Image (cartoon, rainbow, N blue to C red):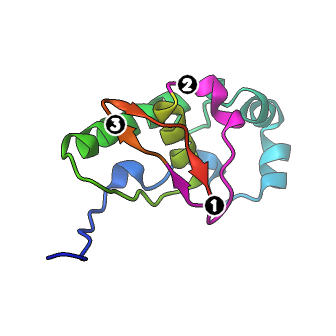
Amino acid sequence: MPGKAKLQQSDTVRAWSSGKWQGLPEEEVRKLYPVLYMRWINEPHKAKIPDGENLDLVRSRVSTTLDRILAQNVENIAIVSHRVILKIIMCIALLLDDSYFRWIKIDTGEISVLEYENGLFTPPFSY
């Protein structure tokens, strides 16, 4: 029916598993895991949070889901998720490896728009 959006939920783009850090205030994470915290800040692509996911694992599951979505040839899609997931999607779209993760800026509640044509994404714009 025209004007109706089809909603699909997927655990693969829902959130990043932050393991032992889940639910802890940032200051507590900084105190409990000082070396790992600094690695997450400076080299997040090299950080492995205890009982959590590294960015390689996130990229793998997000990439698979993104490929599945794009294969459906839907004209417009919206992906609503958390910042880590969205930053990984931006890295994938811009053909960047995860070492650029910190370079991607996404604010809370931000809408970022990508266009996909002929197998390539255009640079994003946000509002």
- Secondary element type, mark 1: loop
Left or right side of 62 for 40: right
Q: Which residues are magenta?
A: 95-113
Between 123 and 40, the one nearer to me in the picture: 123
According to the picture, the residue beneath numbered tag 1 turns out to be 127
In primary-sequence order, the first of circles 3 and 1 is 3
Q: Position of residue 23 (x, y in %)?
A: 65, 60
Left or right side of 120 for 17: right
Relative to 25, residue 50 above or below: above
Q: Nearer the viewer, mark 2 or mark 3?
A: 3
Q: Is residue 23 magenta?
A: no
Which residue shows up at 27% across the image and 68% down it?
7
Left or right side of 14 for 45: right
Which residue shows up at 67% across the image and 31% down it?
44
Residue type at tag 3: Glu
According to the picture, the residue beneath numbered tag 2 turns out to be 96
Residue type at tag 2: Leu
Say which mark, if any, is on residue 54. Answer: none
Distance between the Cα atoms at labels 3 and 1? 21 Å
Q: Is residue 109 magenta?
A: yes
In primary-sequence order, the first of circles 1 and 2 is 2
The quadrant where residue 97 appears: top right
Q: Residue lying furthest left in this view? A: 1
**Number of numbered discs on residues:** 3
According to the picture, the residue beneath numbered tag 3 turns out to be 117
Q: Quarter holding the N terminus?
A: bottom left
Q: Position of residue 33 (x, y in %)?
A: 78, 38
Relative to 33, residue 80 above or below: below
- Secondary element type, mark 3: strand
Which residue shows up at 55% across the image and 54% down it?
112
